[in-house]
Image (tube, grey):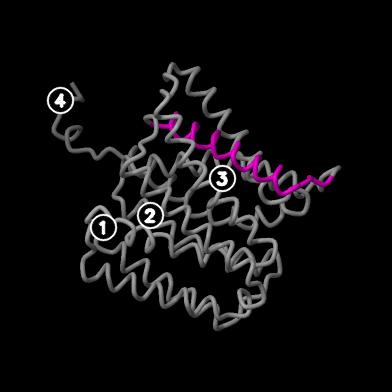
Amino acid sequence: MSASSPTAAVQPDRGPQALILLCLAATWLVWGSTYLAIKFALVSFPPFLQMGSRFLFAGVLLMAWMRWRGAPWPNRVQWRNALVVGALMLGGGMGCTAYSEQTVGSGLVVAFIAVVPLMIAGLNLLWRVVPSRIELLGIAVGLAGVLMLTQGAGFQASPVGLAAIATACVTWSIGSVLSQRSLPLAPGATGFASEMICGGVVLLLLAAVTGEQMQWPPEPKAVGAWFYLVVFGSLIAFNAYMVLLSKASAGLASSYTFVNPVIAMLLGVAVAGETVTHYEWTAAGVVLAGVVLLLWKKSR
């Protein structure tokens, strides 16, 4: 009776809205804090070993969960694609990000990473996806901000860190575009589990080649940061982002790119005592303005 009443018929479904808000909170707050967690974990876990063990552990857990729920294994082509995308996005992207944080503050690193949507827009030109005028303006403004950021004291003091984070942004952007355009993964969470497994293996191989060794026994703070990265960064926030891609606009799902830098820079200053100059804050603001312009039309 009540299900057929006019009042019941017009009641909005609050469930999806609440889910989207929770997923936004996860991508904004959790991902924004993971860069500081990477810095804390570096005390005992060197960069490639830290990222490799993190993603391999999270990927195996997620794959086991999906298999328990009845999801099929990825086929051979999907595993090949996961290897290529994982090597680029996680091996190059996350591995070089952690490497850069050895010499550059976590807040500045994530401010630089905000350029990724601009790079992706440029790479999409290869598939004849031409940006609009406002998107072109966003790209120009964002790139100007990145050039300003590279002239700040943080990156000027560490050319190696600058090269590492620039490499991370390029490889992450290429991997993102290839996964969307020509190298599809297995459907749903199974695909991302395979990407984390393959990327984790590549990172551990890089750790072996570079001779990385974990400090033993590890510092308790480093162990706590590592588990935070596995549970909150890789499992919760990553899957929240996938939910946003399926239930919200692309612009809203990508909004973390201009929220994360603010959170990361504030946490770096307040918690880790990192130094960010007024010039670097201004440069980060210019980068974020470019990202907002790029995503403005999609968000609307």
User: What residue sits right under mark 4 in the picture?
Assistant: 4
Main SS category, magenta section: helix
Residue drawn where x is 45% and y is 20% of the image: 73
What residue sits 65% from the left and 61% below the top?
101
Horizontally, residue 258 falls left or right of residue 106, namely: left
- Work out whether residue 99 or residue 40 is closer to the camera in this orientation and state it: 99
The kind of residue on which mark 4 rests is: Ser
Residue 126: give x, y in percent of width and height: 28, 56
Residue designated by label 2: 254
| Residue pointed to by mark 1 | 298
Q: Note whether residue 11 is visible.
A: yes
Evaluate if marks 4 and 1 touch, with contact meaning CB atoms under 8 Å apart.
no
Q: Quadrant of residue 183?
A: top left
Residue 265 seen anywhere in this rendered image of the structure: no
The one of 74 and 284 positioned closer to us in this rendering:
74
> In the image, which residues are magenta?
188-215
Is 41 part of what is drawn in magenta?
A: no
